[in-house]
Image: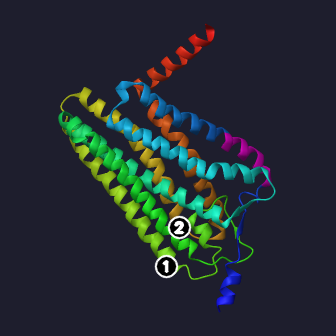
Amino acid sequence: MVHAKINQSSVTTFVLVGFTDYPHLQAPLFLMVMAIYAVTLVGNIGIIVVRRINPKLHTPMYFFLSHLSFLDICYSSVFTPKLLEILVVEERTISLKGCMVQFFFGCACVITEMFMLAVMAYDRFVAVCSPLLYTVAMSRQLCALLVAGSYMWGGLCAVILTYTLTSLYYCEPGIIDHFGCEYSAIVSVSCSDSSFSQMACLVISILSEGSSLLITMASYVFIVFTIIKMPSKGGLQKAFSTCTSHLTAISIFHGIILLLYCVPNANSSRLLVKVATVLYTVLVPMLNPLIYSLRNKDVKETVKRLISSKLHSHSI
């Protein structure tokens, strides 16, 4: 029995199928993903730099946004380089250790981002519902604690799930019908009982998605009631504009994740799972800086000032 298990667990390398079923899409997909990844890096690094340069952006909202940008850079960089690689090379492989490392960082980033968005919703709740107490309520200590808590919970969940996956045995030939080490794709190549791992994944998913959505929805319910009671149109418009960008980012992020995990586990839906994974690992990290920066005057002014100063220095 032990000998059989050793043979089963002898897989040290997985083969990533990626989008090989659609060879005509390989080149255009490579160019598109490369362009999106470049915009993602420039946009998110830009948000972090702009916040550090402009004193007007040294607020809790932009403190959280800079961490969201950092997470987007990390999360995108976990999956995108490997996706680009398997789109151009014939040997589409990843080691067992490499797969677990990719899953760990991907899982940690996505769960941390869930709670970072929830923290930002709470920040908007305090800003709209208690504007006079905002600077006191959202102190540096509290902001640091909320961010640290988000990272710690994301890391803890990733450690638990990665441990349950490393405890499984994997069968030959170790073919993963995906472009990366996504949870369901890894479990599908296991030849041992994965019920404990799947139960752990279900509990963590419900806890994380449920609690982050609950915080977000509760915050926006109070925000809506506060906005409705506002007598002046100017105050109403200002309050609405501060929340629109964040609501857009939340809707896209949670919408794609819920779509991904509501898709039935069938062969016909594998392409949909891959496309949905591309959306939230490649596209969403690019959208966040665009959503927040395009609607903010201070961000746009700082970017214009940076560009004009660079052009001026080059002309001299």
C-beta proximity under 8 Å, tags 2 and 1: no
Stretch in magenta: 23-34
Q: In the rendered structure, does residue 52 fall within the stretch colored magenta? A: no
Rendered image quadrant of residue 233: top left
Rendered image quadrant of residue 9: bottom right
What amino acid does circle 2 point to? Answer: Thr
Main SS of the magenta part reads: helix
Residue 138 place in picture, x, y as percent:
25, 41
Q: In the rendered structure, does residue 32 fall within the stretch colored magenta? A: yes
Q: CA distance from mark 2 to mark 1?
A: 12 Å
Give the color scheme: rainbow, by chain, secondary structure or one colour: rainbow
Q: Indicate the quadrant containing the C terminus: top left, top right, bottom left or bottom right.
A: top right
Which residue is identified by label 2? 162
Tell me which numbered mark, 2 or 1, is placed earlier along the sequence.
Answer: 2
Q: Nearer the viewer, mark 2 or mark 1?
A: 2
Up-down relation of residue 298 to residue 25 (above or below): above
6 horizontally vs 250: left or right? right
Residue 129 place in picture, x, y as percent:
21, 40
Front-most of residues 264 and 55:
55
What amino acid does circle 1 point to? Answer: Phe
Instruction: State the residue lying farthest toward the top.
Output: 316
Q: Residue at x 34, y 35 (%)?
A: 242
Which residue is identified by label 1? 196
